[in-house]
């Protein structure tokens, strides 16, 4: 039994030379895609683009060129196969893939949007939801963040593009506030001047914009002064600035004998608690409890007489 030929299967004749030319076309397209990828990486690095942008879009350009080379190679190897047929097949496959991998494709498109717009880059410190940390990498599917306590968190790009995102290092400086309370009889102008003088000259506090000391609230036992100052935008820089400001201001006010009293809290007892306190100092029959010299309850005379009367008949019977 003879094997079916290409004519028996209603397939076009296949020429070995055409297959070779098609394979060379695909190989040349692959080599050109690698060259294009390397060239675009150098160009975008020279333009100051982020590493994520450079890696993703150079790879996408290389993949596009390789796909065109594969299509051209198939057309050369099989002349009866038209490019429109290949595109039609790809369209059907893309629709099926879009339905099956809707969430994955959503993250991919969101990743392309984030990388092209670059609202933040690797090395920036961001906050989204409960996650706060430093961006390590941005790829097509997710954004990798290292939290401030050293944990690695993967955030889908769809979440990054649709949520409220705070870029802490979006500007060079950020403002921090510290509230200090002074007594009501304190000299407010002197207290503010001492606080500003203590902040002035600290290495972690920026000179421009200058620090401010604003009276913001009348508390229960203090008049609150809000100290506003600017520092570096990174998390550690703001914490170090806050630490130095608090230490310097407390030291300056203490040396000047300006009181910083704690809040006064008034506790009101409920009726049941008041009744319980009133019953602590009474006997079971409602009379006042008497104590001996050592603080122990002292028995009353009528209790002792009652016990003696109860014992008298028993003693007579025993006699």
Image: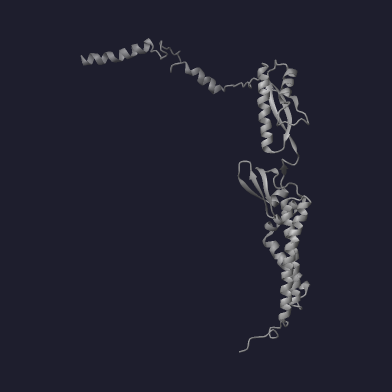
Left or right, 85 with respect to 2, comes to: right
Residue 35: x and y, percent? Answer: 74, 62
Q: Is 252 in front, or is 298?
A: 252
Is residue 75 shown above or below 154? below
Q: Nearer the viewer, residue 262 or 124?
A: 124
**Vertical arrangement, residue 21 with respect to residue 230, above or below:** below
The image position of residue 150, as x and y in percent, is 61, 43
The residue depicted at 73 percent of the width and 74 percent of the height is 22
| Location of residue 244 by image quarter | top right
- Where residue 25 sits: x, y (%)? 74, 72
Name the quadrant of the N terminus: bottom right
Q: Is residue 259 visible?
A: no
Q: Residue furthest left?
A: 319
Q: Is residue 40 above or below residue 264?
A: below
- Picture quarter containing residue 299? top left
Q: Is residue 227 visible?
A: yes
């Amino acid at each position: 039994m003879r094997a079916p030929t290409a004519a028996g299967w209603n397939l076009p004749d296949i020429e070995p030379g055409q297959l070779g030319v098609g394979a060379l076309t695909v190989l040349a397209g692959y080599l050109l895609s690698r060259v294009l990828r390397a060239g675009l990486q150098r160009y975008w690095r020279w333009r100051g683009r982020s590493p994520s942008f450079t890696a993703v879009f150079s790879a996408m350009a290389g993949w596009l060129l390789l796909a065109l080379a594969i299509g051209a190679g198939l057309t050369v190897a099989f002349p009866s196969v038209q490019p429109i047929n290949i595109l039609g097949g790809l369209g059907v496959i893309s629709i099926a893939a879009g339905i099956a991998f809707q969430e994955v494709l959503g993250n991919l498109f969101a990743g392309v949007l984030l990388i092209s717009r670059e609202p933040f880059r690797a090395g920036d410190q961001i906050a989204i939801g409960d996650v706060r940390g430093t961006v390590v990498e941005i790829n097509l599917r997710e954004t990798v963040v290292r939290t401030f306590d050293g944990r690695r968190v993967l955030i889908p790009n769809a979440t990054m593009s649709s949520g409220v995102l705070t870029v802490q290092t979006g500007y060079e400086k950020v403002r921090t506030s510290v509230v200090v309370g002074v007594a009501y009889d304190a000299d407010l102008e002197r207290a503010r001047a001492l606080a500003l003088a203590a902040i002035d000259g600290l290495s972690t506090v920026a000179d421009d914009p200058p620090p401010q000391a604003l009276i913001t609230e009348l508390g229960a036992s203090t008049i609150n002064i809000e100290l506003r100052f600017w520092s570096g935008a990174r998390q550690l820089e703001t914490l170090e600035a806050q630490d130095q400001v608090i230490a310097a201001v407390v030291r300056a006010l203490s040396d000047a004998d300006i009181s910083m009293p704690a809040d006064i809290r008034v506790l009101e007892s409920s009726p049941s608690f008041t009744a319980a306190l009133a019953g602590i100092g009474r006997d079971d029959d409602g009379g006042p409890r008497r104590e001996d010299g050592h603080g122990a309850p002292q028995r009353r005379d009528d209790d002792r007489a009652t016990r003696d009367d109860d014992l008298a008949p028993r003693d007579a019977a025993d006699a």
